Every structure is written in structure tokens, then in C-alpha cells.
Amino acid sequence: MYSTLEVSVEGPIGRIWLNRPERLNALSTELLTELAAAARYFDSQDQVKAVIVAGRGRAFCAGADLQGFPQLDDVNLRAAADAGRVMADSLEAMRAVTIAQIHGWCVGGGLVLAAACDLRLAAEDARFSIPEVDLGIPLAWGGIPRLVREIGPALTKELVITCRAFDAREAQSSGFLNRCLSADTLAGEVQALAEQIAAKPALPVFATKRHTNAVTANMVGIERAWSDADGLIAGLLDPECADARAAYIQSRL
């Protein structure tokens, strides 16, 4: 059913594994589409109260797959550019409580994916970065309002504009992470948290998630992220942005 994910259910707990370890779980259009489909699948599983989102291999997620970057001659350009927003909105709208289990690198679109989850736990050696400006594109997929919601506007501007990397301790102190744990205890702590949530009565758990999301949506305006795809396309068209993107990609070869 899925070619880029592993999806499973064990009683009241579901799991989504990003499964492109050879690409550090980079987000292809196919993976983004499958994540949105997985979110819809879990909403059809009435017994599921918590869903863990994790990555196979050495990283949680290396961000958008640059090899699959939308091309200007793609007849489905806007749909491809908008796939990440659809993914993030679908995860955030899930009935179940979602927990991001972060290890290794969490980059760009991968950070937006994590921000769309309700709770975030990371290994102490996890690293984060938002390189979109260096790639000549604005941070899209609803990333700006989600970061403002979690860490505030000033730090959002700094991290997005400078593209500087930051570690798990800073991510926790800024409010982005719920917990920062040793790498060897991360999976066990995430499982224990999922089990704790799963032991609670479903109605007040789901109502608390919906109520909190409704309050924060009014604060930061995530619903306006539908226009992010237009900013991405503008970045693809701009010559200065194209030069920056080429230089960034060359520096990573």
C-alpha cells in the first residue's frame, strides 16, 4: 500500500515510519502524498488514540528531496509545490495525538513535519536546520505559522533567515521539543508516552487536541498557508534565487 512509509497499528497505538533511509528520509512528492494518505487511514481506525512518527536509518528527515524538486515545466507544478502543505495539514488534523520521535538530522520540510505533530521528543544528538532561504525559496508548507506558534516570531525570523543549525537542547529551551533524551532511551520514552495517552479516555483527549488547535489557529493563521505554494513557485522563477539554489546544491556535492 505504501512504498515510502511503513504504517502499522497495535491496539490503540499507530506508527508511521519514514522509510527512505538511503535518502535520509528526504521528502519526495510521493512520500508527502503517502503521509497525507496515512493520516486519513488512521482517522478510519477508531481504536487508535496515539500515532508515533519516526524515521528509519540515520535521520528523522533530511527535508525536501532536492532530486525531486518541482520543475518549472511540470504540468502539475502547483500541486507538487503544495503537497507539503497538504501533508502537514493532514497530520495536524488527525484525530489521534501524534508524537514525533526525532533522531539525527531534522531539516527544513522535516522540521515542518515535526511541527505538525502534537508532541515532539528528540535524542540529545539530534540536529535541526531550516535551509530554505539558502535554497532561494521561502519556508512553505505552513512552516512559518507553525514555528511562530511553537517558538515565537523573533526566533522564527532568526532561524529561518540565517539558516543556522541548532541542537536539541536549544530546540527544547525554545519550546519546540517536549523532551530531550539520550539516544538509547528515546524509543522507549516515546512508546511509554504513547501508552500513557492510549490509557486515557478518548473523548477528552481528542477534545483537548481540537480545542488547543482551534485556539492556536486563531493566533497564527495556519489556514492562510494555502498560498505558500505560490511563494515556492516565485522562488523557482527568480534568477537570484536560482543562483543561490545552485550554489547551495553544489556546496553539498
Image (cartoon, grey):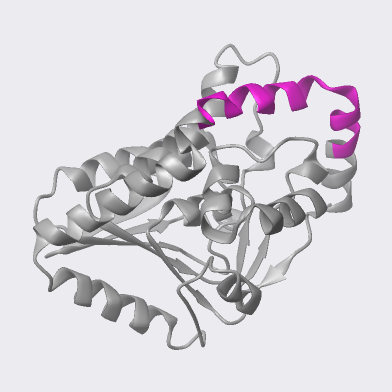
Q: Image check: 55 left or right of 81?
A: left
Residue 136 to residue 157: above or below: above
Residue 1 visible from this viewpoint = no
Image quadrant occupied by the N terminus: top left
Quick check: is 9 in the magenta stretch?
no
Residue 128 place in picture, x, y as percent: 65, 64
Nearer-the-camera pick, 102 or 96: 96
Q: Is residue 231 above or below residue 42?
A: above
Is 58 placed above or below 230 here? below
Q: Main secondary structure of the magenta part?
A: helix
Q: Residue drawn at (21%, 77%), measured in percent from left and top?
A: 196
Dividing the picture into quarters, in which one does residue 24 lie?
bottom right
Q: Is residue 169 above or below residue 87?
A: below
- Is residue 187 visible from the viewing direction of this image? yes
* Along the line of sight, the residue nearer the viewer: 218 or 107: 218
Read off the magenta span: 225-244
Residue 90, percent across and down?
36, 40
| Residue 88 shown left or right of residue 225 in the figure | left
In the image, taking residue 149 as reference, residue 1 lies left or right, namely: left
Which is nearer the eye, 214 or 115?
214
Locate residue 134, reporting x and y percent.
82, 45
